[in-house]
Amino acid sequence: KVLDNASKLGLEKYPRQESRDILYGTAGFRTRAENLPHILYRVGLLAVLRSKSKRGAAIGLMITASHNPEPDNGVKLIDPFGEMLQQSWEKFATRLANASDTELYSVLLAIAEAESIDWEARALICVGQDTRPSSPDLAQAAITGITVMGGEVKDYGVVTTPMLHYFVASINTDGIYAEATEDGYFKKMTTAFKKLRGDKPSNGNYVPSILFDGANGVGALKMKVCLSYLGDSLQVQLYNDGNGKLNHLCGADYVKVQQCAPHGVPRITNARCVSVDGDADRIVYYYTDECDKLHLLDGDRIATLVADYLMELVQKSNLGLQLGLVQTAYANGSSTNYISKTLKAPVACVPTGVKHLHQKALEYDIGIYFEANGHGTVIFSDFATKRICCAAEEPSLPKKQLCAIRTLAAIIEAINQTVGDAISDLLILETVLHARGWSIQDWEAAYTDLPNRQLKVTLKDRRVIETTDAERKSVAPPGLQDQINLFVRNVPNGRAFVRPSGTEDIVRVYAEADTQANADQLALQVASAVY
Ligand code: 16G
Ligand code: ZN
């Protein structure tokens, strides 16, 4: 009966518009906003089934297209512990989104049967949206879908993606997360941050002041809120704070991909600056030097800075915890070298996409993962959390050890472990720089990046490219890897790979080498081999 109503209402209010099929990919569904209303309605229906299949656990539904242009939008579902939707359900999402209006009923029924849905179970869906003009109507479509299926809606309105992940995890678990409200979230994070900072905001070369590029999105709005909790502990000058066009010539993706400073932020020589993306789940740092040259400190730099600091705390705390890092093929070779040779920490490589990194990081007591694009976080296993929190209450421990343990305990409170979170990451990074007494230049001095180049190649069918070994080697078409090997062998410190994009209809090429000219040439050679 419910399914019948749902499919009738769908036909009436949200009929399928697009004839082309759409795929639930690494970023959920993402396309032009005008093609999305029926998708949102259907994802609302699916979210209710997902919640019921998890015996009424809250499920998140986030409406955003992250760093993509303003006319785009998208939606993704969040599972009960704040993680990405389980892969087997991605297939259900794709099937449901692409069903014709008349097939809607049977597809819903098939999913419900395959998952043995208990119709008596309750369903709670937390809905969030970014600042795009199209988001409110799309949220309404989703809410209509949830409601017709008998689901309960908790509408959080405009929030960052990581806030919604946090709220979902917080509703479904007791313990480490704060109350599932904006106030709970900010209070918990900033209280821990202030504790870590102590009463001296300055230290050595570290000055407690940054320039913040909010990409004209929700990150700017929420940073403003965060500031009211931070008090004097950190000075943040906000730019691209929502008056301009979302992600246009600004934001973390622009800075990382274009390798240039965002518009709308004053050029203050050597000043520490940060850029977040349109839904504030990514962050990069940068500064411009005396010659107006941009120095970018991306996800690799962030991972190494955090790892360096946490390694020291882990050693001092003497609790026998294992720390490890997770990267993707895009990680600069110098960063991987630094982690394994200097930090002597285990480092794994996995395919692109947050879900792969997160899953691998769960294997360590303390797992640090960052994509080069600035998305990442630190996760503590239950075992590590218990050990740290218990030991923090042991006043008899030697002072240095206890201090390290309590620092780790505060970091657990300050970090959003559910997913990469630009604001929470910022607080952690500022903590590390403060503790070290470092300027952004000191941070950069840890190692020198290998020059690199990324290219896009358009093919008729990008699926002809198949990869293995965490996307570092191609296995199809035949012969391609041999050619790449030949080119790579010709340049010092050469490394290159190709992979089909998971979000665009293109193939991506990455190359690094001892010089920029060699990296550029290698990338071109590899690109030409792909055609
Ligand atoms: C998605 C992923 C991001 C990845 C990017 C790669 C999530 C939440 N986001 O945006 O992690 O870096 O895709 O895109 O998983 P590509 O496959 O087009 O290179
Ligand atoms: Zn994002």
Image: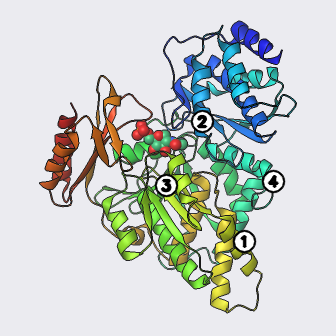
Q: Are marks 1 and 2 in contact (CB under 8 Å)?
A: no
Rendered-image quadrant of the N terminus: top right
Alpha carbons under labels 1 and 2: distance apart: 32 Å
Q: Amino acid at mark 2?
A: Ser
Name the residue that disc number 3 marks: 274
Mark 3 / mark 1, whichever is N-terminal: 3
- For the point 34% across and 42% down, the residue is 467
Q: CA distance from mark 2 to mark 4?
A: 30 Å
Which disc number belongs to residue 179? Answer: 4
Q: Nearer the viewer, mark 4 or mark 1?
A: 1
Which picture quadrant has residue 296? bottom left
Q: Is mark 4 in CB contact (under 8 Å) with mark 1?
A: no
Give the CA distance from mark 4 to mark 1: 20 Å
Q: Which mark is residue 88?
A: 2
Residue name at image x 39 percent, y 49 percent: 470
Is 119 located above or below residue 177 in the figure? above
Q: Earlier in the sequence, mark 2 or mark 4?
A: 2
Q: Is residue 511 visible?
A: no
Dot 1 amino acid type? Lys
